[in-house]
Amino acid sequence: MLKRLNPKLITISGIVLIGISIILFLLIFVISFITLPLAKKGMCISVLFISGEITWWLGIVLLGKQVYEKYKKYFNPKTWFESKKGVIEPVEKESIKSEKVE
């Protein structure tokens, strides 16, 4: 009989996989500045890109839809200026009352 996996372990594994994918994507830029023949650079960059995509999507699958939607909303520029209640409205300037001097 198989035991159910620990949800915390699955979440940590997903976060680690996404972290590894970010490192792999950053290595693409590092490889471009290393003195290697062009064919080897192309091969290394292709392998890093494909590996990064695979680890990214495996991490997303492990974390689940809710976490993906949360971070998708977090990184969406349209939601950066929203408050928890709704969209932040601009501060209204108080009108200066002019008093007539007699």
Image: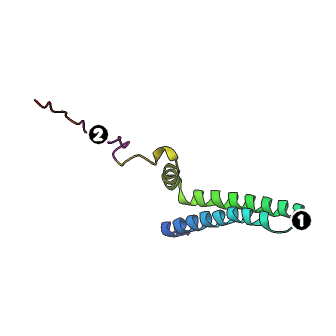
* Label 1 sits on residue: 37
Residue 93 lies in the magenta-colored region: yes
Residue type at numbered disc 2: Lys
54 or 9: which is nearer to us? 54
- The quarter of the picture where residue 37 lies is bottom right
Residue 38 lies in the magenta-colored region: no
Residue type at numbered disc 1: Pro
Rendered view: 26 above or below 77: below
The local crowd at label 1, few if under 14, some if 14 to 19, many if 20 or more residues have their Cα within 10 Å, is: few
Q: Which one is in front in this view, the residue at disc 2 or the one at disc 1?
A: 2
68 or 6: which is nearer to us? 68
- The quarter of the picture where residue 35 lies is bottom right
* Label 2 sits on residue: 93
Q: Position of residue 64 (x, y in %)?
A: 53, 56
Image side of residue 96 versus residue 3, left or right = left
Q: Position of residue 98 (x, y in %)?
A: 19, 33
Q: What residue is rendered at 14% in x and 30% in y? A: 100
Q: Which residues are magenta?
A: 85-95
Image side of residue 35 versus residue 89, left or right = right
| N-terminal-most mark, 2 or 1 | 1
Residue 90's label in the rendered image is none
Q: Report helix, strand or loop for mark 2.
A: loop
Q: Report helix, strand or loop for mark 1.
A: loop
